[in-house]
Image (cartoon, rainbow, N blue to C red):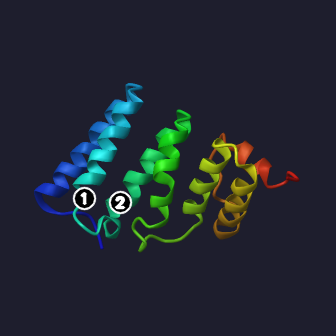
């Protein structure tokens, strides 16, 4: 659908920018809350807007990096419904795999990561994420 326009679009962008500033200052809870506020500010049909994916992506990124399991589990399902017009490269499954891994469900993590690996042709792994790649070769 595109990005939210007008004053509301500016407000959402400002919340996301301030979240990034808080993140850089290692104020992770504040960063997550600002993103949650941006999510709430999205108009009805939230998942239709491009920002929906970016907001959920950023929340999951912070939550995984800071081991906030409750936040991960609260937001991970939303990644599958946010901005469905976005190209499907396995990134959604990779997020679900990361959350399952960090939550201790290695079997579920492996299933998601296997799908992500297939969809992305092996490009779903970021630098420093060897533990997720190694999971593919483990017997569970």
Asked where in the image residue 33 lies, by quadrant, the reply is top left
Q: Would you name the residue on which mark 2 appears?
A: 52
Q: Residue at x 47, y 49 (%)?
A: 74
**Horizontal and vertical percent position of residue 125:** 65, 52
- Specify few, some or many for label 2: CA neighbours under 10 Å numbering under 14, 14-19, or 20 or more: many
Q: Secondary structure at mark 2?
A: helix
Depth check: give the residue in front, 78 or 128. Answer: 78
Depth check: give the residue in front, 127 or 53. Answer: 53
Depth check: give the residue in front, 93 or 75. Answer: 75
Side of 2 where 84 appears, left or right: right
State how far apart marks 1 and 2 are (Cα): 8 Å
* Residue 123, label in figure: none
Q: Secondary structure at mark 1?
A: loop
Name the residue furthest right: 139
Side of 122 where 44 appears, left or right: left
**Horizontal and vertical percent position of residue 27:** 38, 27
Q: Residue at x 30, y 74 (%)?
A: 1
Q: Would you name the residue on which mark 1 appears?
A: 42
Q: Residue at x 30, y 40 (%)?
A: 34
Q: Earlier in the sequence, mark 1 or mark 2?
A: 1
**Horizontal and vertical percent position of residue 65:** 54, 36
Side of 26 where 1 appears, left or right: left
Asked where in the image residue 107 lies, by quadrant, the reply is bottom right
Say above or below: 111 vs 119.
above
Name the residue furthest left: 7
Q: How many marks?
A: 2
- Specify few, some or many for label 1: CA neighbours under 10 Å numbering under 14, 14-19, or 20 or more: many
Q: Residue at x 53, y 33 (%)?
A: 66
């Amino acid at each position: 659908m595109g990005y939210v326009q007008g004053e509301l679009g500016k407000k959402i962008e400002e919340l996301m920018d301030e979240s990034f500033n808080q993140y850089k200052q290692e104020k992770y809870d504040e960063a997550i809350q600002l993103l949650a506020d941006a999510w709430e500010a999205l108009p009805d049909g939230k998942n239709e807007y491009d920002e929906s994916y970016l907001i959920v992506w950023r929340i999951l990124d912070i939550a995984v990096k800071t081991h906030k399991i409750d936040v991960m589990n609260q937001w991970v399902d939303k990644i599958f419904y946010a901005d469905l017009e976005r190209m499907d490269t396995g990134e959604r499954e990779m997020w679900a795999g990361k959350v399952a891994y960090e939550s201790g469900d290695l079997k579920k993590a492996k299933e998601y990561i296997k799908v992500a690996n297939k969809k992305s042709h092996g490009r779903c792994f970021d630098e420093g994420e060897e533990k997720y790649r190694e999971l593919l070769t483990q017997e569970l």
